[in-house]
Image (cartoon, helix red, strand yellow):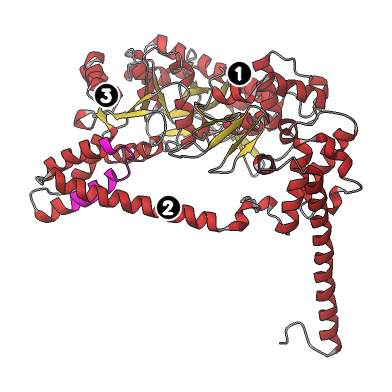
Amino acid sequence: MAFSESFLDELIARNDIVDVVGSYVQLTKRSGSNQFGLCPFHNEKTPSFSVSSDKQIYHCFGCGKGGGVINFIMEIEGLSFRDAVEFLAKRSGMQMPEDDVPPEQRGRRQRLLELNKDAARFFYENLSRPEGQAALEYINRRGISKAMVKRFGLGYALDGWHNLIEAMTLKGYSKRDLLEAGLAKEKKGSVYDVFRNRLMFPVIDIRGSVVAFSGRIIGEGEPKYLNSPDTPVFSKSRNLFALNLAKKSKAGMLILAEGNVDVVSLHQAGFDCAVASLGTALTREQVKLMERYTENVVLAYDADAAGVKAAQRAISLFENTGINVKVLKIPDGKDPDEFIKKHGSDSFRVLLEQSDNHIDYRIMAIMGKYDLNTDEGKIGFLHEATQMLSGLNSSIEREVYGAKVAQYAGVTPEAVKLEVGKAFKRRLRQEKRQAERSEMRVENTYQPDDQSIRYKNVRSAAAEEGVIRLLLLDGGLIRSVGDLKGSEFSAPFLGAVFDKICEKLRAHETVTVSSLAAQLEPAQASRLSVIIGKPEVLSEAEKSMADYIDKIRTEQIRSRGEQDLLAISKKYRQTKGYGEHNG
């Protein structure tokens, strides 16, 4: 994707990385010009995610992700480079230079969004046709009002193989459009509708675009729910059904339900903060998405065994986030929709107020596995419960809930406190050993984790990184580079970055880490943030530059020497009559 460098430079200048990242991550801890927060890309307990206002980059010391503001938006929103640029352009009121975009790529994302919007309109209009009577009867049977049908844009996929394809073809959409949007499939040259005889729920993202669909079968059949596959405009793991509506709620919380009908029923009953995942178990990305809009989440999963298991897994994803989690206990194994229909919204509101703290919920789930009337049951319960409590970082929580566990098992609080303390110390020792093992691997300081950019010659790459770091810290050092070229670097991507920096500096242009990172692959951008974040003494910068260049060239000679020795050895073995497989 070709954007002029002047456009990208202005885009980056208008979107300060601290402001952009701060809208997703709570940045509090300061160290010089850097701010820290909990990484949005992996689960962590202490902040290791750093944002530099000076360098306009981010870097996580835990998972290694890093780069500039464009890279961040690509990662956090799951967007392509061009879509991230467009996102930031809209944010800062800049006009996209459409003329810079090749015709084949221009508006491809927009094309798919328009197709999804027209498909949603087609499904909605089907409810008014005679063929849509079965869907209307199902809607009425589930007690969904006309207002909710309109609010959620519900519709009906007709019971046929080509209804949507024919309707969208008349609007000018191609087979490629339909396949790419996940609305059609192809088998042995025949293209057919993905959604047939289903109540359709459009999936609308937080920006108001129809990005996908979820279809509930009318009558009997499997699967009960069919969801759009991942497409260029949709990722299941990064979206939540009805979040576009729930984000406007004044309830101060989000209710996480299992199914779309549950969500519609909750909104209809006045609980406009309900959302659901889309055909998959809850993901870490969805948790991070919720964290943008609330500090409180209530899990309203079904009360059956599968719902309990899903709730337990979801709780683990919320650990060490800024979200307080409670679990709704719906009696008689009912789901939210069933309970509200039978008992009304006021009774459901009482259930919400009585929701269990997630720690209480986990204790009760463990207790349900054992017979506490037997010694074996008590021991099993105490062992599993104390292990669970040892994972809590708050000593107050460990003591309070330890006392509850003791009461349930009929033992003294002191005994439980002792066992929890032992388990907690074991966990700390294990974490410390893991950290020490990681620190002892010295090569990790210079060797990228990502296999796509692993260094063949770590010694040379360390010096190559040093040259790049010095040039980014002090552009005036370009005079000390001499005739060094990127082709001399052992790491191709470092050589390309070096050449780009030199090109701009020799043209008397400004070079920023953020603008460089925007032009790199995610793994390369992350590595660049590591490079610039390493310490460098500028008081003897010219000497350091000379030392780095000398190291690069020394390693070149050594590498060539090793190759020459291998060639000589091979030739000698051949003259002596040794085969390749002979010892």
* Structural distance between the alpha carbons of marks 3 and 1: 33 Å
Which residue is at 76% across, 37% downward?
A: 472
Residue linked to disc 2: 432
Inspect the magenta stretch and tell me whether residue 396 lies in it. yes
**x%, y% of residue 480?**
87, 43
Q: Quickly name the residue at label 3.
A: 338
Q: Are marks 3 and 1 in contact (CB under 8 Å)?
A: no
Q: Nearer the viewer, mark 2 or mark 3?
A: 2
Q: Quadrant of the C terminus?
A: bottom right
Q: Toward the viewer: 482 or 259?
A: 482
Image mark for residue 118: 1
Q: Mark 3 Cα within 10 Å, few/some/many (few <14, many 20+)? A: some
Whichever of callouts 3 and 1 sits on the residue coming sooner in the sequence is 1
- Earlier in the chain: of badge 1 and badge 2, it is 1
**Is residue 256 or residue 359 the one in the foreground?**
359
Q: Residue at x 46, y 11 (%)?
A: 150
Residue type at mark 1?
Answer: Asp
The residue that appears at 71% across and 35% down in the rendered structure is 517
Q: Quadrant of the N terminus?
A: top right
How many labels, in total? 3
Q: Amino acid at mark 2?
A: Lys
Instruction: Write the start and end of the magenta stretch as one range.
Output: 380-397
Looking at the image, is 335 positioned above or below residue 521?
Answer: above
Q: Position of residue 99 (x, y in %)?
A: 83, 21
Taking the image as shown, residue 516 lies to the left or right of residue 363, namely right
Image quadrant assignment for residue 54: top right
* Residue drawn at (68%, 26%) of the image: 83
Q: Amino acid at mark 3?
A: Glu
